[in-house]
Image (cartoon, grey):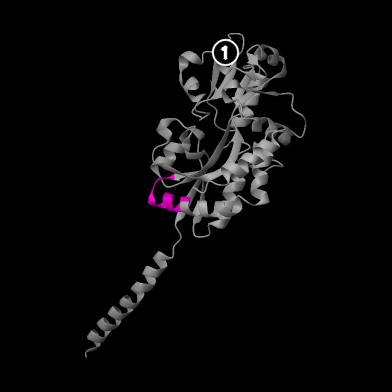
Amino acid sequence: MSSNSLLKAFVFAAVTCALPQQTRAESSKKPELTWLNIDWQPAWINNGPLKGLGYAQTVERMLREGMAGYDHIDRPVASVTIYSTLQNRDACFAASPYQGKDLQEEKKHGVIWSAPAYLYFYHGIIAKPDAVPAIQKHATDGYVNFRSLIQDDTIKGAFQDGRSYSRWLNPIFADPTRRKNLFKSTDDAGRTQNMYKLIDAGRVDYFVDYVTMLKYQRAATGVPSDYVYLPIEEHKDLLSMGSIVCSDTPLGRAAIRDINEVLGTIRLSPEFRDANRRWLMPEGQEEIYWRKWETELLPLKK
């Protein structure tokens, strides 16, 4: 055999041997799983003494630790773009209403949810103290009738644009004719603190949010808060659940299967329960909260 033929044979053999190694290297590469996050406390807390203790932040970290088969990527987004991002690229988000029950219809398409990871009471009213007497004119047995309140021209409220509240409040905020006494906040950075700033500046008398926002304000400042939380009639005695949502794609569906498997273990851990207790359990509601946790949340595996 000529030297030229020997060289060709050697090159062919080298290339042939290299191909399986290259294929194995490509197949062993971990899929990238992008996690969306927003500047919203106490779901995510990125500064101060409570840094890293957000409830969605804690759950996401525990999931990532249990999902070693993925390369996990962080991606901050504006809150109004969460679901459009999920619908247009592979990603997951750790703080969504379970099965999308409280989302606007356009946000429910092209996404898929995990088993529940959070249990929480619905929104009420956070108000400055001197506004409470006027607000309570619309209350019965301690619960404020929100539809009556927003018709009162002497009281100004606030809500956050583009945010999903509940299936009972979303239609109100979406209707300009019904929200003439409501200020629509469009600030996205520092969403929680911006609402308190609106009250402190005298621009509004109250805003609509979870009791957890009041708990965070107290915990972040280290001093008792002057703000008052008032439950609303539309949400009386209602509890809801939250979960992780991913893009409804091959990667997203695989991620949800793996997330559900990890949730089956970590939902039983003290750290997981504490993340819910710290931020999402109202004071004085411990018995009903943990009863529903055991009987309604834990049995759901997907």
Mark 1 secondary-structure assignment: helix
Query: As displayed, is residue 71 above or below residue 233?
Result: below
Q: Nearer the viewer, residue 48 or 227?
A: 227
* Magenta extent: 247-256
State which quadrant residue 124 falls in: top right
Residue 76 image point, x, y percent = 52, 42
Residue 107 image point, x, y percent = 43, 34
Image quarter in which the N terminus is found: bottom left
Residue 106 image point, x, y percent = 40, 32
Q: Residue at x 68, y 15 (%)?
A: 131
The furthest residue to the top:
153
Residue 203 drawn in magenta: no
Q: Nearer the viewer, residue 19 or 135?
A: 135
Query: As displayed, is residue 191 above or below residue 295?
Result: above
Q: Residue at x 58, y 20 (%)?
A: 158
Q: Is residue 251 left or right of residue 49?
A: left
Asked whether residue 53 appears in the rendered view, the answer is: no
Query: As displayed, is residue 71 above or below residue 58?
Result: below
Identify which amino acid the numbered label 1 is placed on.
Answer: Ser
Q: Is residue 25 left or right of residue 141?
A: left
Residue 50 image point, x, y percent = 69, 42
The furthest residue to the right:
223
Most frequent secondary structure within the magenta stretch: helix
Q: Nearer the viewer, residue 156 or 100?
A: 100
